[in-house]
Image (spheres, rainbow, N blue to C red):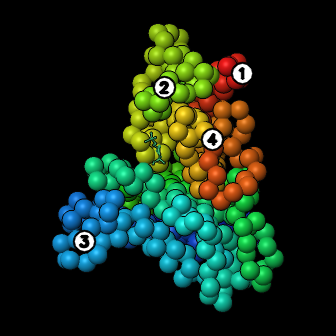
């Protein structure tokens, strides 16, 4: 059994200019994940948090779990002194850490502290997504938005925690994708999947077909392609959609599939956030031999202009994403 901590230290030499700071950062995320995991598992036992943050059975004012997750990760990251600041789905503006180490900290972190949190009340898996960059502002100067508005290919590390039937932490530093399963009896994440790769072929497609009539024509054509009978390409594919990006991506990573959230009538630029949902998942996908695009272009090459900007997202088995892109290209003018 190899723990996440041991693995990070062991792999530290793979990371250029390894000074232990990235290891400390990943350990902060690990600590935050353990605390969030504890409270998510309790969510079924106390007065459920839900959308209104009602009080719990102890009579305390219960934070909404996604707010709690945000505060927990922020505190864990600030305490280590290796992060200059964060951007989060739960924060309208970027958060510059005030401690005196922050000005000299090397990294910035972007995160979706609890993606899919609306699923908690119905006991469906949810996740934390994180993305790590080197700051671009010189050490010693206060960071600014430009430290966060970097294209995804500049990521130093990225990953997610999935709070499901078991809790897993999956991450990459650009040297493969590695997954760790939490053992609550001893409070450690243990290496369970080293160097995870997508299967070469997949037969699962994940999309909210409720929006079918408002999808781009290329997406409609790809959905029908998935549903056609063709023994050679093992179609029809299976439709699986949990409504939790981390859960759908994790299943597709292990079993072989594609996840699509295109632009729709409600979300003209797609629903998912580029910086802390699409980019980290895209980094993992490419490291696992898969592909991630906005339907036309590589997600990791999009130059961000706003912290919370959205993007259409096609991610999964390389051949499946390429098939979908072919339909998008063929019908792009319709
Ligand atoms: P819809 C959760 O809110 C989320 O951001 C992703 O985790 C998930 O894949 C998607 O939105 C679900 O959106 O519109 O299908 O409910």
Say whether residue 175 is left or right of residue 301.
left
Mark 4 surroundings within 10 Å by alpha-carbon count, few (fewer than 14), some (14 through 19), many (20 or more): some
The residue carrying mark 3 is 55
Q: Which secondary structure, mark 1?
A: loop
Q: Is mark 4 within 8 Å of ligand 1?
A: no
The residue lying toward the viewer, choosing from 63 and 279, is: 63
* Figure quadrant of residue 101: bottom right
Decide which of 151, 269 is in the foreground and name it.
Answer: 269
For image coordinates 27% across by 67% down, the residue present is: 54
Label 2 lies in ligand 1 vicinity (Cβ under 8 Å): no
Quadrant in the picture for the N terminus:
bottom left
Residue that mark 1 sits on: 333
The answer to whether the residues at label 2 and label 1 have Cβ atoms under 8 Å apart is no
Residue 97 in the image: x percent, y percent? 62, 80
Disc on the earlier residue, 4 or 2:
2
Label of residue 212 in the image = 2
Q: Residues within 10 Å of mark 3 (few under 14, many from 20)?
A: some
Q: Residue 67, located in which quarter of the rendered image?
A: bottom left
For the residues labelled 3 and 1, the Cα–Cα distance comes to 52 Å
Tell me where residue 275 appears, x and y as whole percent.
Answer: 63, 55
Which residue is at a point 43% across and 46% down the rendered structure image? 244
Q: In this rendering, is residue 93 above or below 81?
A: above
What distance separates the C-alpha of mark 4 from that of mark 3? 37 Å
Residue name at image x 55 percent, y 44 percent: 271
The residue lying at 47 percent from left, 48 percent from top is: 246
- The residue to which callout 4 is attached is 269
- The percent coordinates of residue 324 (x first, y second) are 61, 25
């Amino acid at each position: 059994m190899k723990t996440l901590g041991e693995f990070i230290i062991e792999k530290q030499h793979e990371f250029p200019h390894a000074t232990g700071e990235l290891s400390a950062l990943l350990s902060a995320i690990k600590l935050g994940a353990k605390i969030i995991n504890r409270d998510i598992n309790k969510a079924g036992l106390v007065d459920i948090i839900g959308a209104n943050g009602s009080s719990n059975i102890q009579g305390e004012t219960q934070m909404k779990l996604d707010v709690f997750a945000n505060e927990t990760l922020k505190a864990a990251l600030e305490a280590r002194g290796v992060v200059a600041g964060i951007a989060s789905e739960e924060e309208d503006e970027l958060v510059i850490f005030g401690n005196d180490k922050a000005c000299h900290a090397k990294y910035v972190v972007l995160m979706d502290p609890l993606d899919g949190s609306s699923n908690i009340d119905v006991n469906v898996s949810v996740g934390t997504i994180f993305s790590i960059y080197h700051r671009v502002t010189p050490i010693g100067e206060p960071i600014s938005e430009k430290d966060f508005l970097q294209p995804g290919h500049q990521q130093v590390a990225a990953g997610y925690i999935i709070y499901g039937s078991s809790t897993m932490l999956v991450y990459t530093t650009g040297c493969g994708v590695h997954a760790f399963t939490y053992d609550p009896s001893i409070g450690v994440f243990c290496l369970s999947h080293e160097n995870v790769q997508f299967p070469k072929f997949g037969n699962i497609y994940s999309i909210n077909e409720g929006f079918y009539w408002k999808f781009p024509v290329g997406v409609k054509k790809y959905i029908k392609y998935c549903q056609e009978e063709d023994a050679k390409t093992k179609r029809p594919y299976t439709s699986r959609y949990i409504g939790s990006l981390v859960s759908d991506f994790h299943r597709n990573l292990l079993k072989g599939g594609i996840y699509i959230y295109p632009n729709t009538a409600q979300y003209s630029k797609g629903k998912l956030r580029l910086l802390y949902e699409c980019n980290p998942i895209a980094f993992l996908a490419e490291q696992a031999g898969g592909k991630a695009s906005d339907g036309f272009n590589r997600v990791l090459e999009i130059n961000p202009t706003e912290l919370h900007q959205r993007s259409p997202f096609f991610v999964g088995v390389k051949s499946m994403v390429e098939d979908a892109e072919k339909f998008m290209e063929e019908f792009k003018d319709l």
